[in-house]
Image: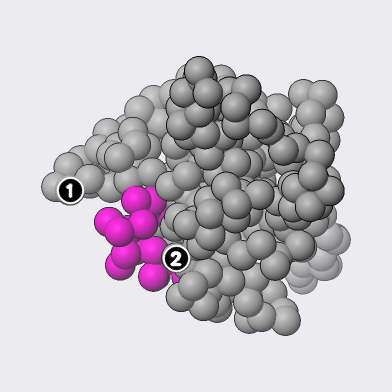
Amino acid sequence: MNLVRALCCSLGVSLATPLFAGAALAQTDATTGSAVANPGETSSIDMSAIDSVDECMVALICIDRYLWSLYARTPKTDTIKVPEQIKAAVKRRGKTRTVTRTITKLVDEDFTWKDPKAAARFGMSPADYVIGGMDQSFRITLYHALRALDEAGFMPGITSAFRDDYRQAIAAGQKAQTDRSYHGGSFRGGYGHGLAADIVSVKGETRAERWASSEQLWKWIDTHEKELGIGRPYRDRDAPHVAPLDGKEYAAHRVEPNTQHAELKAKTRQRVALRSDHGLLKHVRAARPSRAQSRLQTRST
Ligand SMILES: [Zn+2]
């Protein structure tokens, strides 16, 4: 138990938090004396090597639990655009005609169901899917960054982490092609290789309040990205999306001075790709939010 306590405390994790049920269980076992080893029997084994492996395991479990708790506490609602057909009376040359117009309505969407559904297809628990699908070292970087945000009073939350191709296909808002997502698309290595997470602030009673505190959190990430080791490759075009600072996605979109050049090249490539598929072009045009709405619809959820 001392090992668990030492590790969790060195990570800045409080054992008083109910999240660390595993740590609490370990404590119970230790007090009943069921796991006491006789030191004489293991003198020929290098216990320090085994201990260091144990330390790693416990630390990683604590990290995953913390990340999951931040995911679990975060409301998963977004604003999406829904086309709606309405009938309107139009006067033309003195005659009144009824025409059908398509308007776009902004509707709140609850996307809580998406990750559990994708996890079930994988035959996994949502926690193993959402958190376990991320790259191991990214999870550690993300953990420290989120702890720093929490300590700075931002109350961070996670709305999305690992996403496989299926989950990416049912995501709304700004998103990469199904298999290209750094959240874990198959082109990027799939499960265990997710290198992105969407983070917001859960501070505030209403969505408007939480949006305002999220904007402060994102700004804080921008000014502290070097210390945090994570950054926002798309800034406000996909505000909650964070990636490791030393990763490919960040390099492709944010590293100066070639940022603009790279973005221009990407846009040209996109245009060429779209020209070959008119159906897709229509879809993309219809889905592109207006400037006024883009603030509401920057998450790929
Ligand atoms: Zn994202």
The answer to whether residue 196 of the structure is visible from this angle is: no
The answer to whether residue 19 of the structure is visible from this angle is: yes
Magenta region: 217-232
Given the current orientation, which residue lies at the most extreme front position?
40
Q: Which residue is mark 1?
A: 256
Q: Residues within 10 Å of mark 1 (few under 14, many from 20)?
A: few
Indicate yes or no whether the magenta region holds residue 229. Answer: yes
Indicate yes or no whether the magenta region holds residue 159. Answer: no
Q: Which residue is mark 2?
A: 148
* Spatial CA span between label 2 and label 1: 26 Å
Image depth: mark 2 or mark 1 in front: 2
Which residue shows up at 82% across the image and 65% down it? Answer: 88
Which residue shows up at 79% across the image and 44% down it? Answer: 33
> Which sits in the foreground, 171 or 221?
221
Image coords of residue 297 (percent x, y): 59, 59
Given the current orientation, which residue lies at the most extreme left position?
257
Image coords of residue 274 (percent x, y): 48, 28
Decide which of tag 2 and tag 1 comes sooner along the chain: 2
How many numbered discs sit on the rendered protein?
2
Contact between labelled residues 1 and 2, with CB atoms less than 8 Å apart: no
> Which sits in the foreground, 90 or 50?
50
Which residue shows up at 41% across the image and 31% down it? Answer: 270
Under mark 2, the amino acid is Ala
Q: Is residue 118 above or below residue 239?
A: above
Q: Is residue 91 left or right of residue 14?
A: right
Image coords of residue 283 (percent x, y): 62, 37
Under mark 1, the amino acid is Glu
